Amino acid sequence: MSSSICYKMIESILASLSDYAALRYTNVAFLMLLIYDHIITFGDEVSRIWPLPWQLPKVSFLVNRYLIPPMLLFNGLTPSIRLKHNMYA
């Protein structure tokens, strides 16, 4: 009976780690797409956005382009920090 419980627990842990790996790969893929988008549109940004006066459209564009992605990246890294902490605790 106890070996069955142990097997189910190991199976659950392996499934969680597999889901975690898929999540990490997905996060990396979307981060690469975001970096690619920044690279190919940077010239348009410089010519069209930078000359604009500091008003709501420019500020909202810059916030969306330069503040939100690092927040998403940090949010993606936080579960890995928690998972490693819980594994060693």
Image (cartoon, grey):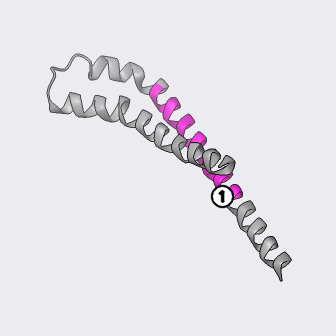
Residue found 71% across the figure and 67% down from its top: 12
Residue found 36% across the figure and 32% down from its top: 65
Instruction: Give the answer, above or below, for where 28 lies relative to 12.
Output: above
Q: Quadrant of the N terminus?
A: bottom right
- Looking at the image, which is closer to me, 61 or 49? 61
> Is the residue marked by circle 1 packed among few (<14), some (14-19), or many (20+) residues within 10 Å?
few
At numbered mark 1, what does the secondary structure look like: helix, strand or loop? helix
Q: Is residue 61 left or right of residue 32?
A: left
Residue found 22% across the figure and 28% down from its top: 58
Residue 50: percent from the left, percent from the top? Answer: 26, 18
Residue 21: percent from the left, percent from the top? Answer: 68, 50
- Looking at the image, which is closer to me, 45 or 4? 4
29 in the magenta segment: yes
Residue 19: percent from the left, percent from the top? Answer: 66, 58
| Residue 24 visible in the snapshot | no
Q: Amino acid at mark 1?
A: Asp
> Circle 1 is placed at which residue position?
19
- Looking at the image, which is closer to me, 33 or 25? 25
Instruction: Give the answer, above or below, for where 2 lies relative to 81.
Output: below
22 in the magenta segment: yes
Identity of the residue furthest to the front in this view? 89
Instruction: Give the answer, above or below, for where 5 lies relative to 37.
Output: below
| Residue 29 visible in the snapshot | yes
- Looking at the image, which is closer to me, 21 or 53? 21
Residue 16: percent from the left, percent from the top? Answer: 67, 60
Residue found 41% across the figure and 22% down from its top: 42
Which is the main secondary structure of the residues drawn in magenta? Answer: helix
- Provide the residue span drawn in magenta: 17-38
